Image (spheres, helix red, strand yellow):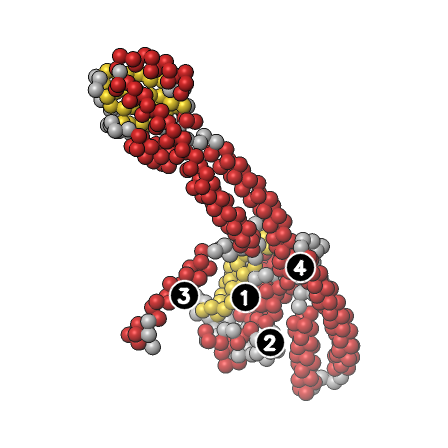
């Protein structure tokens, strides 16, 4: 639809309605803790603001207005009495101090101040200004901030300025701050209780997520359900699922061990018979077929076995890489290893070694120069890069190369013994540790395999 047609239908009027939820969603907390806290704290704050506004509007303003009006009436009486008989100022001052608690002084020859100090409580000044304006016909000035316990009121008279000091509690309600303090204190207490309660509930979900992530990496953790009923139900469902998966893995491991034994026994007999047979060209072909069959069985079992049963250990990465690189050197490739001896990784040593052997030997099968570099990852953990100068793989087939039993013959001309499980095994190992394996174009001209493992 064109912008003109869009405007013609008047849909622009609905833009604010469409954009407002999106803006709120973008600025809303992303964590469960933040959202739960917002759900509880926001209504409390709105309620406290409403109560405070109602108190100040319906009670505090009314009381302050009445007190200011009463004080303004007393000031007007003092000014009128003085103007009627200036000589009786002493009598008026004594009577005002005894009856009205007002202190009166005549400042002869003076003028009213030109400025008034800024007040944080504008309603006080507004009430006093209105009351004095209604009661007095002479110019006046007042200050509610200079003295903590008094209000300074000055009225211009013929002889100078009549200064009147009145107690603050006569001008406005002084107990309003107590109400505000109680309100703020109650809010802090409620917020603290809400934070502790929500944090306890969210922690149960976080522990469940950590246990699920650890189990996904093959790490068995001691996890007990706690928290709210729904969280405990989810945690118990996770534990039941974990037990079922572990039983499945154990049964699969036992089955694979039996299959391995059953297949290797006839293979061993065949190898023995071939070793005792008369040498011939056909016999050599049979031996090569038998060796290939044994190699294929080893790769199938390694792929199916995955990471089962091996514990995670902290190992030196350089030692394992150098050990793996020996096989590529024996195959005739020039291998360069760059890794600090202090670089450590938490892995399953056998699975890690098998995956790195697949990557390095896969590179050695198609190249004569290999570089293996291990370094700390940008976001923590370890990053291992395997480069070769072979023919490489087209970028649009990188993901296809990770599919099990896929052999990309036209791209890499794989060795005849391969069954297309090397990259699949490497990625399975990395993802089992919480990382991944990706392929890129190598600076050497061939393929670059990057193994990323979390810290």
Q: Where is residue 239? Give x, y as percent.
A: 71, 61
Q: Can residue 186 be seen in this snapshot?
A: yes
Of the residues under marks 3 and 1, which one precedes in the sequence?
Answer: 3
Instruction: Give the quarter of the image for residue 129.
Output: top left
Query: Left or right: 250 with respect to 326?
Result: right
What secondary structure is found at the residue carrying circle 2? loop
Q: Which residue is mark 3?
A: 18
Q: Where is residue 390? Give x, y as percent.
A: 48, 72
What residue is at 51 percent from the left and 47 percent from the top?
47
Q: Where is residue 195? Give x, y as percent.
A: 58, 46
Of the residues under marks 2 and 4, which one precedes in the sequence?
Answer: 4
**Disc on res. 404:** 2
Q: Which residue is mark 4?
A: 230
Of the residues under marks 1 and 2, which one precedes in the sequence?
Answer: 2
Callout 2: 10 Å neighbours few (<14), some, many (20+)? some
Q: In this orientation, which residue lies closer to the viewer: 6 or 92?
A: 92
- Between disc 3 and disc 4, the foreground one is 3
């Amino acid at each position: 639809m064109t912008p003109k047609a869009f405007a013609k239908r008047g849909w622009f009027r609905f833009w604010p309605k469409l954009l407002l939820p999106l803006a709120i969603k973008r600025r809303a907390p992303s964590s469960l803790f933040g959202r739960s806290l917002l759900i509880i704290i926001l209504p409390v704050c709105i309620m406290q603001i409403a109560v405070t506004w109602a108190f100040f509007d319906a009670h505090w303003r009314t009381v302050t207005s009445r007190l200011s009006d009463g004080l303004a009436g007393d000031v007007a009486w003092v000014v009128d009495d003085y103007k009627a008989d200036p000589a009786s100022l002493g009598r008026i001052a004594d009577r005002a101090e005894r009856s009205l608690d007002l202190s009166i002084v005549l400042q002869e020859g003076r003028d009213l101040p030109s400025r008034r100090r800024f007040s944080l409580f504008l309603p006080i000044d507004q009430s006093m200004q209105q009351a004095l304006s209604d009661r007095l016909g002479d110019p006046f000035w007042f200050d509610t901030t200079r003295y903590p316990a008094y209000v300074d009121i000055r009225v211009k008279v013929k002889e100078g300025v009549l200064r009147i000091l009145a107690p603050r509690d006569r001008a406005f309600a002084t107990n309003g701050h107590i109400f505000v303090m109680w309100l703020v204190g109650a809010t802090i207490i409620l917020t603290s209780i809400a934070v502790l309660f929500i944090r306890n509930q969210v922690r149960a979900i976080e522990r469940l997520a950590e246990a699920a992530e650890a189990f996904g990496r093959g790490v068995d953790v001691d996890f007990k359900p706690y928290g709210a009923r729904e969280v405990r139900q989810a945690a118990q469902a996770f534990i039941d699922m974990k037990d079922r998966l572990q039983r499945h893995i154990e049964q699969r491991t036992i089955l694979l061990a039996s299959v391995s034994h059953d297949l290797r026994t006839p293979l061993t007999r065949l190898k023995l018979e071939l070793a005792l047979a008369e040498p011939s060209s056909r016999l050599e072909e049979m031996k090569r077929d038998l060796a290939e069959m044994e190699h294929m069985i080893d790769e199938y079992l390694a792929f199916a076995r995955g990471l089962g049963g091996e514990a995670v250990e902290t190992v030196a990465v350089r030692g394992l890489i150098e050990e793996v690189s020996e096989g590529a050197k024996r195959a005739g490739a020039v291998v360069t290893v760059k890794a600090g001896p202090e670089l450590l990784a938490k892995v399953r040593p056998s699975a890690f070694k098998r995956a790195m052997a697949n990557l390095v030997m896969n590179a050695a099968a198609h190249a004569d120069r290999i570089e293996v570099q291990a370094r700390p990852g940008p976001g923590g953990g370890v990053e291992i890069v395997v480069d070769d100068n072979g023919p490489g793989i087209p970028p649009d087939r990188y993901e296809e190369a990770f599919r099990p039993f896929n052999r990309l013959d036209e791209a890499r001309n794989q060795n005849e013994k391969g069954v297309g499980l090397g990259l699949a095994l490497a990625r399975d190992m990395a993802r089992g540790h919480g990382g991944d394996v990706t392929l890129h174009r190598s600076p050497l001209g061939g393929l670059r395999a990057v193994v990323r493992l979390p810290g």
